[in-house]
Amino acid sequence: MNLLIMGLPGAGKGTQAAKIVEEFGLIHISTGDMFRAAMANQTEMGLLAKSYIDKGELVPDEVTNGIVKERLGQADVAEKGFLLDGYPRTIEQAHALDTTLAEVNLKLDGVINIDVDPASLVERLSGRIINKKTGETFHKVFNPPANYKEEDYYQREDDKPETVKRRLDVNIAQGQPIIDHYREAGMVHDIQGNQEISAVFADIEQVLIDLK
Ligand code: AP5
Ligand code: MG
């Protein structure tokens, strides 16, 4: 199965992606995670990405399209199927993805669209904490880890309130044409994202069982 997971910043893409790949054995491809890894390693691409991400802006399409194309061409993706998280994020990226998939002879099976009230997202992002060792994502209030110790967790640089506002504006502006593109193809499965994490997953699971 080859899938996209879409939704505004904080909608729960990463949280649900972790559960989906565990149950369905797909390869999780998150452009945000790839950029953060490159930033941590201070590669040339990482430094370039940082200059956009820190401002809440999108990394230029040619850079993003390039890393996704490279990843989708690897053998494990064809073998296991993929779950793309955070890509495409512009209509140009959606068109580039169509071309890349044709080139590597893969086809998309569905788009999971996590629909959330934007008003709930600032609170989600400001309370997000990530385990330094495992990379697992939690929330101070909505999904607290067992035995929470502040020193074991960090917060994302781009979760500062000023940056969050810009991220939301950018993603709201860019998102609609992408959803329309996939809706026309009959591929979108809307999921109500303002529910408990486990209830959101139960809805996604049902869609994926039907798709399989
Ligand atoms: P990226 O890392 O993709 O960030 P994002 O899209 O802003 O989404 P997030 O990862 O912030 O949110 P999420 O939906 O994964 O939510 P999560 O599950 O963590 O991208 C970061 C940056 O990289 C971009 O701004 C851009 O600059 C660049 N970039 C990435 N891809 C790009 C592209 N294609 N083109 C150009 N630039 C690109 O959940 C959030 C919090 O809420 C957590 O604390 C979680 O525990 C909690 N939570 C989750 N679900 C629930 C629930 N149901 N109820 C209550 N709390 C919940
Ligand atoms: Mg994420």
Image (spheres, grey):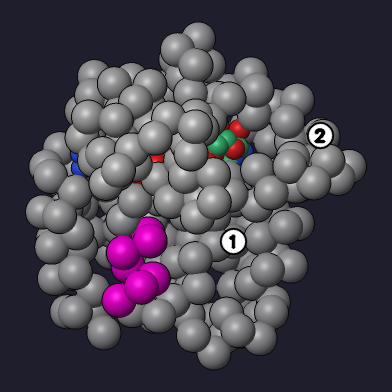
Q: Quadrant of residue 99?
A: bottom right
Select label 2 or label 1 by which is in front: 2
Query: Where residue 188 sits in the image (x, y, percent)?
Result: 28, 58
- Magenta stretch in the rendered image: 17-23
With respect to residue 156, does 164 lie above or below?
above
Label 2 CA crowd tier, 10 Å (few <14, some 14–19, many 20+): some
Q: Amino acid at mark 1?
A: Leu
Query: Where residue 199 sits in the image (x, y, percent)?
Result: 10, 54
Magenta stretch, overall SS: helix
Residue at left 40%, top 80%?
25
Q: Is residue 19 magenta?
A: yes
The foreground one among 7 and 196 is 196
Q: Amino acid at mark 2?
A: Leu
Residue at left 55%, top 62%?
29
Q: Is residue 114 left or right of residue 154?
A: left
The foreground one among 177 and 146 is 146
Labelled disc at residue 97? 1
Q: Is residue 203 visible?
A: yes
Q: Spot the residue most to the right.
A: 44
Q: Is residue 172 visible?
A: no
Residue that badge 2 annotates: 48
Q: Quadrant of residue 60?
A: top right
Classify mark 2 as within 8 Å of ligand 1 or not, answering yes or no.
Answer: no
Q: Quadrant of the N terminus?
A: bottom left
